[in-house]
Every structure is written in C-alpha cells, then in structure tokens.
Amino acid sequence: MRKKSNVAYTKRMLTIILRSIIIYLIVLFVFRIMGKRQLGQMQPFELVLTLIIADLATIPMAEISVPVLHGIVPLFTLVILHFLLTLLTRLSTTLSAVVSGKPVILINPRGIDYKAMKKLSISIDDIFEAMRGLGYFSLEQVEYAIMEPNGKISILPKAELAPATNQSVGAQVEKAVIPINIISEGKILKENLALANVDEAFVEKFLKTNIGKAKIKDVLVMTLDDNGAVYLQLKQGQKQIFENVRVA
C-alpha cells in the first residue's frame, strides 16, 4: 500500500515538473514576442498585463486538477489583447492618452505646478528624490521636470547648468564606432568575425605577436572596432589596448 502511495506521489511530482516546464516556456515565449521593455519602462496597461500573466501562470503549474490548456488559452488571449491595444494606441492619440496617460509638466520656469503634483498624487519628497537620482539637488537647477506616462521624471536643466557637448565647445572628435566582440571567455564568436572583417587566422596571429604563448582559451574578452582599436584582457591579467591595428 505504501509502495503504491509512493508511486502516486512520484507521478504527481513529475506531472507538476512537466507542467511547470511547459508553462515556463510558454510565458517566456509570450514575453519575448511582447518585447524587451524593462519594468520601469512599461506603460500602465503593459504592467497590468505582466502582473496578470504572472498570476495566471502559477495556477496550472501547481493545480493538477486544472487542465494545462486552461492556463495557456488565457495567456494567449492576453497577448492578442496586448497587440490590439498597442495597435489602437498607435492609431489614436486620444485612446493612447486614456490607456497609457500622457506626460505632465511638474516644474516649469515659474516653479512647481501644485495642481499637477496633486493630480499625480506625488509629494515634494518624491520630486526631490527623482531630481537627486538624475544628479540635481536644487530646484534652482531645473528649468522643466516632466512626469512621463511610465512614472519616471525627466528633467531639463537650466541652460547654464546643461552638460557641455563636443558641439557646444567646438571640439573635433573621431566618428563613434561600436567595438565588435571577437572572443568571449575563451571562445571565438565566429558570427562576429565577418562583421569585423577578420578571420581566425588573424586572431591567432595577433595573439601570438602581442601576447606570446597565450591561447584563445586564455582570453577573457577581445574586441575590435573600425578604427583598428583592440581591447584585450586575459582571464589572468589586466586589460591591454592596442591602437591602429592593421586588419588586412
């Protein structure tokens, strides 16, 4: 009798594990097709959808009496609803304002907008906290502060306090380039070699010439950009930067 109960318990556990894997993969797929926004960047309807999906996913995982399909169908229904709402908010600015909200100016050249602050149910402390997070510690530094629909505050500093740019000071700079990762934790990223216009022979020759006995497996990271700059660091060692490396 005890043996039968053990077998039944094992089957139950295996069923729960299998259902958990299935639901996990489906939820992962759902979030992948919904996009890669971080939690703080979500619009209100996206955050609500995320919370509902998280709650729905737990039910068929643990409750064996609930068919898996009863968990899958609501998930895909919500995904379809998400795409419909996204499409409609793109087509209608009015609906977008209703569903997602719209930016609200909290601080303007005249000072803090008290009515806007109360409408958003935030306090002075909330405004100061957001300002400090962006590097501003005085209201006198801020020209405009805007509450975005996702709940974050954007700040436009006064002109005299705005960060200097290369354009504003007339500095001559090189064109910005994106370094391409060639080696990561001892492995060559073959799909990136073509992007960098090099091959494995170039990498091996470069390592032999500049590092000596070091092999590819000893490299923690190696990147190459269009200006011929190589960033190289071994797993046991400090970073090294090589300029004007000839690729061809």
Image (cartoon, rainbow, N blue to C red):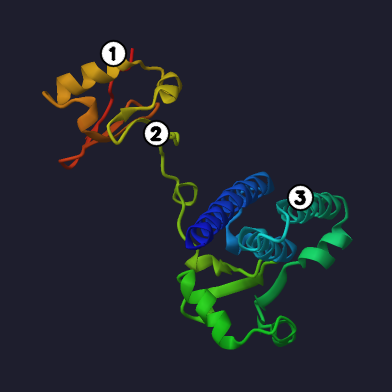
Q: Which residue is mark 1?
A: 201
Report the residue that reaches farthest toward the left. Answer: 213
The residues tagged by marks 3 and 1 sit, at their Cα atoms, a distance apart of: 48 Å
Callout 1–callout 2 Cβ contact below 8 Å: no
Q: Is residue 115 left or right of residue 2?
A: right
Q: Earlier in the sequence, mark 1 or mark 2?
A: 2
- Please state, as top left, top right, bottom left or bottom right, where the C terminus lies in the image: top left
Q: Earlier in the sequence, mark 3 or mark 1?
A: 3
Residue 64: quadrant of the picture? bottom right
Given residues 88 and 244, the one toward you in this image is: 88
Number of other residues with Cα within 10 Å of mark 3, as a class: few under 14, some 14 to 19, many 20 or more: some
The secondary element bearing badge 3 is classed as: helix
The secondary element bearing badge 1 is classed as: helix
Amino acid carrying label 2: it is Pro
Q: Residue at x 70, y 73 (%)?
A: 105
Q: Nearer the viewer, mark 1 or mark 2?
A: 1
Residue 139: quadrant of the picture? bottom right
The location of residue 185, given as percent across then percent down, is 29, 36
Q: Which residue is mark 3?
A: 76
Callout 3–callout 1 Cβ contact below 8 Å: no
Q: Which residue is mark 2?
A: 179
Q: Earlier in the sequence, mark 3 or mark 2?
A: 3
The location of residue 197, given as percent across then percent down, is 41, 17
The residues tagged by marks 3 and 2 sit, at their Cα atoms, a distance apart of: 39 Å
Q: Residue at x 44, y 50 (%)?
A: 169
